[in-house]
Amino acid sequence: MKIGVDIDGVLVDFVSGFLQYYNLKYGTDLKYNDATTYYMEEAFGLPQDKISSIMNEYLRSHAFVRMQLIPGSKEAIGNLSSRHSLHIITARSSDIYDRTVGWLHHNFPGCFSKILFSNSPGLPKMSKAAICKQQGVSILVEDSLENALTCSAAGVTVFLMDCPWNQRGQLPENVIRVSDWQEIVETLQKEERFLTETL
Ligand SMILES: [Mg+2]
C-alpha cells in the first residue's frame, strides 16, 4: 500500500520548535496549546509581517534542523516502511528543499520511496489531494484539517494527528483522528490481519 506522510506536525514538532524560537527572541510565552488554528498570526493575534519575517529566519536557523521528532515517529516509520511504500507529501516551500531532503535522509534513512513537494521548483503548485491521486496514495498521515478534508473528499483515508489546531467541526468517516504513531501502526496492523484472514 502507498502511504503519504506529511512532515510538520507529523514527523517533527514544528509548532513547539517555532514557538520556542519566537519566545526566546521576543521574551514572550506563546504556548503550544493556544495554537488553535494553523495560522500563527490568527492564533496569537500577531501581525502577519512579523510572523512571516521570523518564520523565514527560523527556516534557515540551526534550531529548525534540530527540531524534536514526534515521539514514536522513527520507530513507526521504520516498521511501516518494511511493508508499505511511504511517500513524503509536504507543503513546505521549495526554498528549503535541500535542508528538508537532507534532514529526512539523516533521520529516516532509506524509509521513503518518494519525497514530493506540493511546491516543486519549476512546476505548478499541486494540492495534496491531487498528489495522492496522481501517485495512487490511499492513506495519508496529516495534521492539517484543511488537507485532511480535501484528501478525504478525493477518497483518501486520512490519519489525522490530534493537535490543538485541527479540532474544529465533525470529521468525515474516512478521517481517523489518532493520538500518536503507535495508534496508526496498530490500526494498520489490524487491517492487514483482517485482510489476510478474509482472503
Ligand atoms: Mg503538517
Image (cartoon, rainbow, N blue to C red):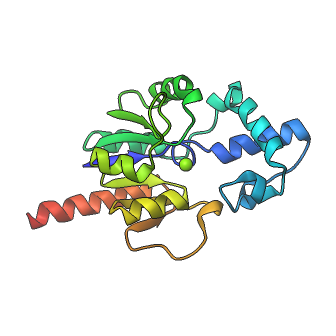
Placement of the C terminus among the 4 image quadrants: bottom left
> With 16 as the anchor, is 157 left or right in this view?
left
Q: Position of residue 116 (x, y in %)?
A: 41, 36
Res. 29 in view: yes
Question: Along the line of sight, which residue is nearer the eye, 12 or 152?
Answer: 152
* Side of 189 where 108 appears, left or right: right
Placement of 64 over or under 69, stated as above or below: above
Left or right: residue 35 compared with residue 24: left
Circle count: 0
Q: Residue furthest right?
A: 27
Q: Nearer the viewer, residue 176 or 183?
A: 176
Q: Give percent across and percent down for residue 45.
A: 83, 57
Left or right of residue 50, residue 68 in this image: left
Any part of residue 112 in sight: no
Question: Residue 44 in the image: x percent, y percent?
Answer: 81, 56
Residue at 13% across / 60% down in the picture? Answer: 196
Which quadrant holds residue 154? bottom left
Residue at point 65%, 62% (across, down): 164
Answer with the quarter of the image where residue 33 lies: bottom right
Q: Nearer the viewer, residue 80 or 5?
A: 5
Location of residue 133 in the rendering, given as x and y in whole percent from the top left corner: 31, 51
The vertical placement of 175 against 54, above or below, is below
Of all residues, the one furthest to the left in this rendering is: 199
* Furthest residue in direction bottom, as rendered: 170
Measuring 75% from the left and 40% from the top, which residue is drawn there? 52
Residue at 43%, 66% (x, y): give it: 176
